[in-house]
Image: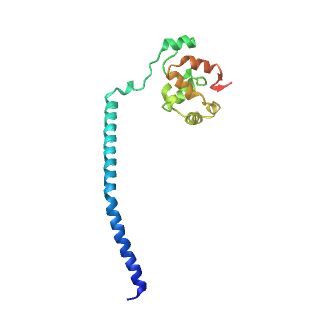
Amino acid sequence: MNLCILIPLITGIICAILGYLIGKATAGNNTREIDEWINKYSALEKDLADCNEKLNSKDQNTLNIIPFDATLAKSIFGKAVKENDLKIVEGIGPKIEQLFKDHGIATWKELSETSVHKCQDILDDGGEAYKIHSPITWPEQARLAYEGKWQRLHEWQDFLKGGRIK
C-alpha cells in the first residue's frame, strides 16, 4: 500500500479517537453545568410566575398611581387645576391637548413617558400650524405634574415661554 495514503488515514483515526476520548472526559463537566443552568432557569420561571400572579392580583388602575392633590396645585398655581389637564404644561393649549388625546396621550403620565421625538411627530401630523411648537420640555413638565411636584413645575415654567426656555 502506498505510504502517502496510509499516513493521513492513521492521522485521521488517531484524531478521531483522541476527540472521542477528550469529549467523554469533559462530558461530565458539561452535564453538571447544564444542570446548574436548568436549575437557575427553573428558579427564574418560578419568580416570573410569582411576579405575574402578584401583578394580576392587584387592580391595574391602582398600580403606580400617584394621588392628585388639587388643593396643593391650586395653592401654587393660583387657579384650579384639573387632574391630567395637559394644558398645565407650558406650551400646550386646547388644540394641542386635543391633538395629543387623538393620538392616545390623555394623561400627564402618558405624556411624561412620550419621547420628545414622538411629541414632535404628533405635532407634525397635526399640520403646518403645529410644526412651529417645540415640545422639548413637555414630557418633563408632565412628569412633574404627574408626580405632584407643583412648586418645581411652577418655578421651571417661570423660565419658559411656549414650552421653550426664554
The residue sitting at 36% across, 69% down in the picture is 18
* Residue farthest to the bottom, as pictured: 1
Task: Depth check: give the residue in front, 34 or 21.
Answer: 21
Q: Position of residue 71 (x, y in %)?
A: 49, 11
The residue sitting at 45% across, 21% down in the picture is 66
| Residue 80 seen in render | no
Q: Looking at the picture, does residue 32 appear above or below residue 86?
A: below
Number of numbered discs: 0
Q: Is 143 positioned to the left or the right of 54 in the image?
A: right
Q: Looking at the picture, does residue 154 appear above or below residue 57?
A: above
Q: Looking at the picture, does residue 77 appear above or below residue 3?
A: above
Q: Looking at the picture, does residue 45 appear above or below residue 99?
A: below
Q: Position of residue 9 (x, y in %)?
A: 38, 79
Q: Position of residue 47 (x, y in %)?
A: 33, 37
Q: Position of residue 154 (x, y in %)?
A: 59, 18
Task: Depth check: give the residue in front, 102 or 145.
Answer: 145
Task: Depth check: give the residue in front, 160 or 28.
Answer: 28
The residue sitting at 48% across, 31% down in the picture is 104
Quadrant of the snapshot with the N terminus: bottom left
Q: Is 25 positioned to the left or the right of 8 in the image?
A: left
- Asked which colour scheme the image uses, the reply is rainbow
| Residue 121 seen in render | yes
Quadrant of the snapshot with the C terminus: top right
Q: Quadrant of residue 13?
A: bottom left
